[in-house]
Image (spheres, rainbow, N blue to C red):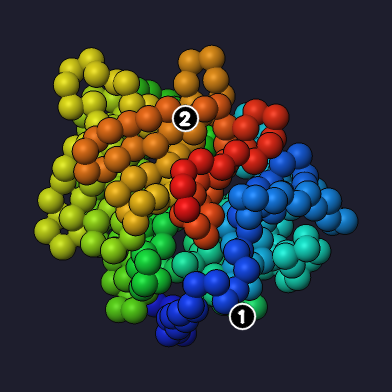
Amino acid sequence: MRIRPDWKWLSVCCFFAAGLLPAAPAFFAAEGKLLASTGEKTETLEPDLPVPIHELHGMMAGGRPLVTLGAPEISHGYELEQGSTLAILTSGGAIDEYVATDALRGYPSPSGKTIAVLKSDFSVTLWREGTETPLAFDKPVTLVAWSPDESKLCLTAYPEDWTPWKANNPESEEEFLRLIDSNLWLADLESGGVRQLTDAPGYDYSGVFTPDGRSLFFISSRAGRGAFFLMDLETSGLRQLTNLEPGSYDVPVGRSDTFVWLDKGSRLAYEAQEIGEKAVIRTFDVTSGAAQRLAPGTQPRVLDSGRLAYLDKSLNVVVTGKE
């Protein structure tokens, strides 16, 4: 398989001296509203939009939030009928630009200039300056992650005939095990090549590039239960990070698309589900294996100062760490 975009782009890096620009706020979505927090001050925005905000997916260049408007239409619990509208808002919450219809999620590139759009048919397109270019990848994709230099994508993909409905209504146990067998693929946007990174029975998903782009953090069931792994992308060497001893499941895996790097890439913060709590903010040190439970909360974000911010159960912004 090959991915052949019709265009190429150059990553432009800009460096600013500390203190010349005001701190950029971290944005959160809560009950159709947007919260913009610098850590010291939180502003509530109530945008006048044609459809309420369903989810915030990250930030575009210029501090503009990328959101989906309206929830996807799902029937019978699993049958996806229609996706949402993906839109870029101004920093004040107004519509700046419509990106795509019938979308599930949008993944802004690190520079905030390109979006990997996950469509409702589980295909991926690349959006840039108003143009969508499909990726020629023939497997259903459910999760996407950008490399730091924007030259690669990590795709979580399933068998060609997978759908949520089929996976939740299998004709046999064998069919079920085949359909839930997800793997990670690396798409090189410069060469057009794609290669399979994992091939273990069960699920491998939620890949996250390390800040240096050399390794991939992900979740796998190959250990018998969900565990964290780290893959060296040059050698394909694997290191299991959690659940190393039988029965030791004290570090719950995280919800996809909630992982953020802290401390220059040594720690991850993420959102997990625990018994009695729908969402809890946790951190994990990929070097030492040290894990910490912070508090019930959602939507972990990293402020310009490097501090961690998240929403608590009352939808207040909580900031932890030191500048």
Residue 110 position, x and y percent, is 47, 67
User: Who's the residue at 23% across and 26% down the image?
Assistant: 243
For residue 192, above or below residue 209 = below
- The amino acid type, in three-letter code, at marker 1 is Glu
Picture quadrant where residue 117 is located: bottom right
Circle number at residue 294: 2
Mark 2 or mark 1: whose residue is earlier in sequence: 1
Tell us which disc is closer to us: 2 or 1: 2
Q: Is residue 142 left or right of residue 250?
A: right
Residue 240 position, x and y percent, is 19, 37
Q: Is residue 280 visible?
A: yes
Q: Is residue 220 left or right of residue 94?
A: left
Image quadrant holding the N terminus, namely bottom left
Whether the residues at callouts 2 and 1 have beta carbons within 8 Å, the answer is no
User: Who's the residue at 62% across and 32% down the image?
Assistant: 312
- The amino acid type, in three-letter code, at marker 2 is Leu
Picture quadrant where residue 30 is located: top right
Looking at the picture, tell me which residue is in the foreground, 250 or 140: 250
Circle number at residue 129: 1
For residue 150, above or below residue 254 = below
Q: Is residue 200 visible?
A: no
User: Who's the residue at 65% across and 50% down the image?
Assistant: 40
Circle number at residue 278: none
Q: Secondary structure at mark 1?
A: loop
User: Who's the residue at 18% across and 27% down the image?
Assistant: 244
Q: Kindly report the distance in space between the C-alpha atoms of the residues bearing marks 2 and 1.
A: 39 Å
Q: Secondary structure at mark 2?
A: strand
Residue 186 position, x and y percent, is 30, 61
Residue 119 position, x and y percent, is 57, 57
Looking at the picture, tell me which residue is in the foreground, 245 or 120: 245
Label 1 packing within 10 angstroms: few (<14), some (14-19), many (20+): few
Q: Is residue 15 left or right of residue 19?
A: left
